[in-house]
Each structure stands twice: as structure tokens, then as C-alpha cells.
Amino acid sequence: MSVDDPGKGVGRRDLLSLAAWGAFCASLATALVGAFRLPNPSVFPEPSLKVKVGPPGSIPELEYRKVAGRNLFVSRGEEGVFAISAVCTHLGCVVAPVPSGFHCPCHGSRFDALGRITGGPAPRGLDWLKVAKAPDGELVVDEGETVPPGTYLKI
């Protein structure tokens, strides 16, 4: 507003001044919001793909044990300990153990006791997962690393 004429509307210079102050306040408010959000993470870490499954003696021999909260089975044979993924290679359903091996309840894929495909639409057998021994003596399965079928950890 001009001091000279109170009846006159907002002048061009006053309008530009108000616009500049408005832009300054908006950028300051945006910067403050960003500064307050900075200490809080916007990306949360995923859980580890490595899981401890217990000491070698706790793994059942010639039968599968489902690891709680994970989609994998562990077992022990004459050759050693191994882990098989419980995720069907067709569309990612979780397979269930049956006396002859594994069965996918979604689309009917069937796998033998070593995860090899025996029927159904799955394109390949179940993935074998890497098993290692931790420094404390427990076995660790890495769900993020597949190994060739028939890879055992000698115990």
C-alpha cells in the first residue's frame, strides 16, 4: 500500500514485495519441515537373510524341520546338513512337506525329498540354500545365497 494515497489498491512494487516475502516464508517453512524430518529414517532396514538354526545335533536326521518365521526347511543326511527353500519356483507359494517330499498347495507342483521337480507347473526344483557354521558352533542358513542342489555342509 502506498503512503501517499490510502484509497489506491496495492501497487506493483508492493505486490512484488509481498510475493518475495511469501516465497521466502514458504521456502523457510519447507526447510524447517525437512530439518525436523532429518533425524527420522525414511528407509527401514530389512531383516537379515541369515538365520541361525541351532547346533548340528538339533537338526533332525532324514526329516525336515521348518524354521520358525522363515520359508525354509533344514535336514540332516549321511552327507551332512542341508537347507531347502520352501518357496515354490512357479509363483512363489509356500510348499508343504508331504511323505514323498513337498507339495505346492496353490497350483499343484510336486517335489521329491531333495526338492527336485516331479510334477506340476513349476519350471525347476526348489532352491538349495547355503549352510555354514558360525563361530559359536551353531548352523547358519543364508536365504539370500543359493547353492547347487546336493551341496551339503559336512559336520
Image (cartoon, grey):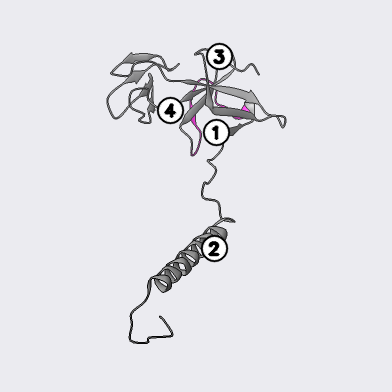
As shown in the figure, which amino acid type bears the numbered disc 1? Answer: Leu
User: Residue under circle 4?
Assistant: 86
**Dominant secondary structure (helix, strand or loop) of the stretch shown in magenta:** loop
User: Residue under circle 2?
Assistant: 32
Position of 107 with respect to 132 (left or right) is: left
Instruction: Give the Cα distance between marks 3 and 4.
Output: 17 Å
User: Residue under circle 1?
Assistant: 49
At horizontal 38% and vertical 15% (from top left) the residue drawn is 124
Residues at discs 4 and 1 in contact (Cβ within 8 Å)? no
Q: Earlier in the sequence, mark 4 or mark 1?
A: 1
Q: Secondary structure at mark 3?
A: loop
Badge 4 density bin: few <14, some 14–19, many ≥20, Cα 10 Å? many
Position of 155 with respect to 102 (left or right) is: right
Q: Which is in the foreground here, disc 3 or disc 1?
A: 1
Q: Position of residue 39 (x, y in %)?
A: 59, 56
As shown in the figure, which amino acid type bears the numbered disc 3? Answer: Thr
Decide: is 42 above or below 57.
below
Instruction: Give the Cα distance between marks 3 and 2.
Output: 55 Å
Position of 145 with respect to 5 (left or right) is: right
Where on the picture, by quarter, is residue 1? bottom left
**The residue positioned farthest toward the front in the image shown:** 4
User: Residue under circle 3?
Assistant: 151
* Range of magenta residues: 57-69
Q: Earlier in the sequence, mark 2 or mark 1?
A: 2
Q: Position of residue 86 (x, y in %)?
A: 43, 27
Residues at discs 3 and 1 in contact (Cβ within 8 Å)? no
Q: Which is in the foreground here, disc 3 or disc 2?
A: 2
Instruction: Give the Cα distance between marks 2 and 1.
Output: 37 Å
Q: Earlier in the sequence, mark 3 or mark 2?
A: 2
